[in-house]
Image: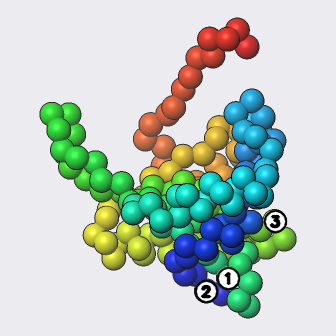
Amino acid sequence: MRIRETNDYVIIAKLNKGVHELHEKLYPEYFKPYNFEDMLEYFKEIVYFPDFIFLVLEEEEKPIGYAWIEIRNYMENALIKANQAIYVHQINIEEDHRNNGYGGHLMDAIIEMAKSKDIHRVELDYWFDNEVAKKFYEKLGFKKYREFVYKNLSGD
């Protein structure tokens, strides 16, 4: 197993399929169906953003998982102290490789990256109905410190 940084948007667009399809299944009112060509164009545009980092997890040189992370710099102001965090946008392991510890290895790599950059917090969020993500992050020791709520004004 190997984890490395990548800018290969083709690999990222392919590995995004599982997480995107889950989101679309849970929340079709927000997510479009997965379309490889659209994902390819999207990731081609953002893969070189300066604060974005993409990690790919390979087993026997075959990509089987990825993480999309961002280094966030929170500027000091009247309300908060300046601080940094690594924010996990997405993490996904191909379905036939799940429950083998690969997601944990990706999170370990993210935590090690944060430590190497002297960043003391890893942040993330997940959709409320995503029980798999909820259990995964709880198992890794993540704690809730904020909740995001909404009120739908369209009558639904």
Q: Percent position (x, y) of residue 31?
A: 72, 39
Looking at the rendering, in which quadrant would you find the C terminus? top right
SS at badge 3: helix
Crowdedness near tag 3: few (<14), some (14–19) or many (≥20) residues, C-alpha within 10 Å: few
Q: Amino acid at mark 1?
A: Glu
Q: Residue furthest top?
A: 155
Residue 25 higher or lower than 69, as above or below = above
**What's the mark number on residue 58?**
1
Residue positioned 55% across, 76% down in the render: 6
Q: Amino acid at mark 3?
A: Glu
Mark 2 sits on what residue? 2
Residue that numbered label 3 is attached to: 95
Tally of marks: 3
Q: Position of residue 48 (x, y in %)?
A: 47, 65
* Amino acid type, residue under disc 2 in the picture: Arg
Does 142 sit left or right of 118 as displayed?
Answer: right
Pointers 3 and 1 in contact (C-beta within 8 Å): no
**Does any portion of residue 139 appear in the rendered image?**
no
**Residue drawn 69% across the image and 70% down it:** 10
Q: Position of residue 45 (x, y in %)?
A: 55, 58
Q: Residues within 10 Å of mark 1 (few under 14, many from 20)?
A: some
Residue drawn where x is 36% and y is 54% of the image: 72
Residue drawn at (76%, 57%), measured in percent from left and top?
37
Identify whether 114 is placed above or below 129: below
Task: State the CA–CA distance, disc 1 to disc 2.
Answer: 5 Å
Tell me which corner region of the image, top left, top right, bottom left or bottom right, holds residue 4: bottom right
Tell whether label 2 touches label 1 (CB within 8 Å). yes
Find numbered disc 2 in the image and state the secondary structure of the residue it sits on. strand
Position above or below: 132 against 129: below
Quadrant that contains the N terminus: bottom right
Give the CA distance from mark 3 to mark 1. 14 Å
